[in-house]
Amino acid sequence: MAHLFDIFVPGIPVPQGSKTPWGTEANPQTRPWRATLAWYARKAWNAKPPMSGPLYLVVEFFFPRPKSHYRTGKNAGKLKPTAPRWKPGKPDGDKLQRAVQDALVDAGVIRDDALFVAWHGSKEYADQPGVKIIVTEEPDNDPPNT
């Protein structure tokens, strides 16, 4: 299936989580991250009319590796053979995805995040932190190859 929208946004992904009793984001980093996502999305979408559904979303979140993943001494900077690919634990994938979906609405790429009928996400370690966002038409049965 052809990608309708495909971008990479650099930066350390931030979840969109709970709201304060006053209706603002509890995490102060959420607002700037969503603004960054929306800026990149708006620029890539280039003022086209918003997409309508049904839509399929693929999001791949990339996080910086901790120092403990790397060797020391003469092999400093090289990954240990035991360094994992996947990032378990916080932040929650659904909260990361929520920030992406809302930013796509903010940017005018999609009309409403309720248009997503299926999604796939992952959290992994990488040299370049950020998020890869792919939007396609409704999938047949399998996620698109990314």
Image (spheres, rainbow, N blue to C red):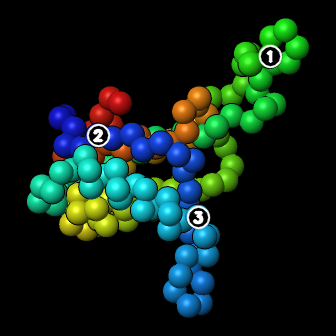
Which quadrant is home to the N terminus?
A: top left
Q: CA distance from mark 3 to mark 2?
A: 24 Å
Q: Which sits earlier in the primary sequence, circle 2 or circle 1?
A: 2
Q: Position of residue 120 (x, y in %)?
A: 41, 45
In the rendered image, which residue does mark 1 sit on?
76
Q: Nearer the viewer, residue 125 or 33?
A: 33
Residue at 36% in and 44% down: 133
- Image side of residue 8 versus residue 45, left or right: right
Q: CA distance from mark 2 to mark 1?
A: 35 Å
As shown in the figure, which amino acid type bears the numbered disc 3?
Answer: Gln
Numbered circle sitting on residue 6 = 2
Q: Residue furthest left?
A: 49
Q: Position of residue 97 (x, y in %)?
A: 45, 56
Please rate how many residues cluster around mark 3, counting C-alpha atoms within 10 Å: few if below 14, some from 14 to 19, many from 20.
few
State the image quarter where residue 67 is shown.
top right
Please rate how many residues cluster around mark 1, counting C-alpha atoms within 10 Å: few if below 14, some from 14 to 19, many from 20.
few
Which quadrant is home to the C terminus?
A: top left
Q: Position of residue 143 (x, y in %)?
A: 33, 37
Whether pointer 3 and pointer 1 mark residues with C-beta atoms closer than 8 Å, the reply is: no
As shown in the figure, which amino acid type bears the numbered disc 2?
Answer: Asp
Q: Residue furthest bottom?
A: 22
Residue at 47% in and 42% down: 10
Q: From this viewpoint, is residue 138 visible?
A: no
In the rendered image, which residue does mark 3 sit on?
29
Q: Which sits earlier in the primary sequence, circle 3 or circle 1?
A: 3
Q: Could you tell me which secondary element the residue under label 1 belongs to?
A: loop
Please tell me whether mark 3 or mark 2 is closer to you in this view. Answer: 3
Q: Residue furthest top?
A: 74
Residue at 54% in and 65% down: 30
Numbered circle sitting on residue 119 = none
In the figure, 134 relative to 67: above or below?
below
Q: Could you tell me which secondary element the residue under label 2 belongs to?
A: strand
